[in-house]
Image (spheres, rainbow, N blue to C red):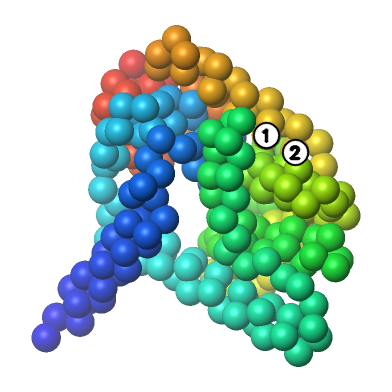
Amino acid sequence: MDVISVYDEYIDKKRRELEEERYDDYKDWFHASGSGSCARKHYFRNVEKVEGKPKSLDTMRLFRLGNIVHEDIQAAVSEFAVDSKTTIYIEHEIRIPDLNVRGFLDMVMVEDNELYDIKTCNGYNFKKIFGKRKSPYNEPTNYYMQVGTYGHWYELEKGKSLDKLALLYYNKDTSEMRELIVPRSYMQKAIDYWTKVKNQFKWGVPDVKLGFAPYRKWECNVKYCDFYAHCGGGLDK
């Protein structure tokens, strides 16, 4: 038996099941997880319905590892919620019709008014974010806007102000965990971003322009963008 192939097929099956359950009936909606990323990617996926480049097997294994860490942390928090009789949202679906955005937030501790999104990363990226020589250029602003999108929905839907927005990082190389506070200003930045995306799409696919399409320069390459070929090379063209 080829165990590696069996595992890869299992991962792909789990991916297809999740996509069918969560996204097949909502292909016109923007993904909250895509907040702060290249606007052209949203257009290709949600308007043109283009199938992105398949992920490599190694990448899919990394995604699966991230999902397992998510599930483990969420299971621990859920158990704590039952024992302490507190209310916690886990993998809660959000919809913001005015912005055409839909997604699934990781965790909200209702009594504490705290919202968390879980991220796994390698040691190199962990050090860039939390190391002594951290730079504003290394800040995960796309993740900030993702959390801002969730925070905007929560405050709008529940009528309660959040006291904390945070990214909970898990270092896959060392198992170290740390919190990164997300400024509340990113809720408004997320609103502005999605409003611009929605308005621009009335005129068709946005032109290639750094700061919006793509949002950050590092996005625009064949390794990170599933639509690089369809786009025509983005900044490189």
Query: Quadrant location of residue 101?
Result: top right
Determine whether 80 is above or below 189 in the image: below
Q: Position of residue 21 (x, y in %)?
A: 37, 59
- The quarter of the rendered structure image containing the N terminus is bottom left
CA–CA distance in space, label 2 to label 1: 5 Å
Does the rendering let one see residue 151?
Answer: no
Q: Which mark is residue 187?
A: 2
Name the residue nearer the viewer: 235 or 26: 26
Task: Count neighbours of disc 1 (C-alpha within 10 A) and say few if under 14, some if 14 to 19, many if 20 or more.
Answer: many
Determine whether 187 is above or below 18 in the image: above
Under circle 2, the secondary element is: helix
Q: Position of residue 189 (x, y in %)?
A: 72, 31
User: Could you tell me which residue is drawn at 80 percent across and 77 percent down?
Assistant: 86
Task: Count neighbours of disc 2 (C-alpha within 10 A) and say few if under 14, some if 14 to 19, many if 20 or more.
Answer: many
Q: Position of residue 157 (x, y in %)?
A: 73, 47
Under circle 1, the secondary element is: helix
| Residue placed furthest toward the top | 203
Residue topped by disc 1: 190
Query: Quadrant location of residue 235?
Result: top left
